[in-house]
Image (cartoon, rainbow, N blue to C red):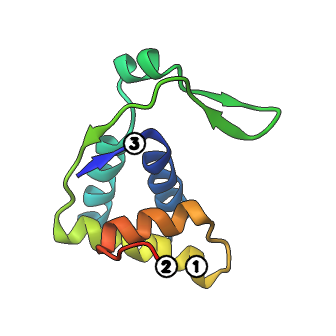
Amino acid sequence: MNWIIGERLVLLMALQASDSGKNFATLRVLRKLREGLSFSSDELKESKLEFNEATGMYNWGTNINKEFDFDETETELLVKALEALSEKEAATEAHLAVYDKLTGVAPE
């Protein structure tokens, strides 16, 4: 599945806010997920991705797609992280879009 910069950032931030990772096995899966979703130096250069401290937002010039297929465990961790944000009433439209993409729910 292709993931654009904004989606990857949403997933990375959801994982960061997640309470998952209480054992070594889960920590290893989370590390692999973060590494896969993170940006290579070539991607950073090509996309011109940067953090704007004044707005607290990421900006980029060129959107880059990255093929990344999650296994069942990875998908479960990502879905749980997004659902935790929803339960805290901290979810956004961006969270909903990646949640729908992960779970195969068609947007309404």
Q: Judge by depth and name the residue closer to the eye, 45 or 32.
A: 45
Q: Are marks 1 and 2 in contact (CB under 8 Å)?
A: yes
Q: Residue at x 77, y 32 (%)?
A: 53
Mark 2: which amino acid? Glu
Q: Residues within 10 Å of mark 2 (few under 14, many from 20)?
A: some
Q: Residue at x 32, y 36 (%)?
A: 65
Q: Judge by depth and name the residue closer to the eye, 92 or 78.
A: 92
Label 2 belongs to which residue?
83
Q: Residues within 10 Å of mark 3 (few under 14, many from 20)?
A: few
- Label drawn at residue 42: none
Where's residue 49, x and y in %? 54, 26
Side (left or right) of 28 relative to 9: left
Q: Judge by depth and name the residue closer to the eye, 55 or 74.
A: 55
Where's residue 86, x and y in %? 58, 79
Residue 23 in view: no
Side (left or right) of 22 relative to 19: left
Q: Secondary structure at mark 2?
A: helix
Label 1 belongs to which residue?
86
**The furthest residue to the right:** 54
Label 3 belongs to which residue?
4
**The furthest residue to the front:** 108
The first of marks 3 and 2 along the sequence is 3
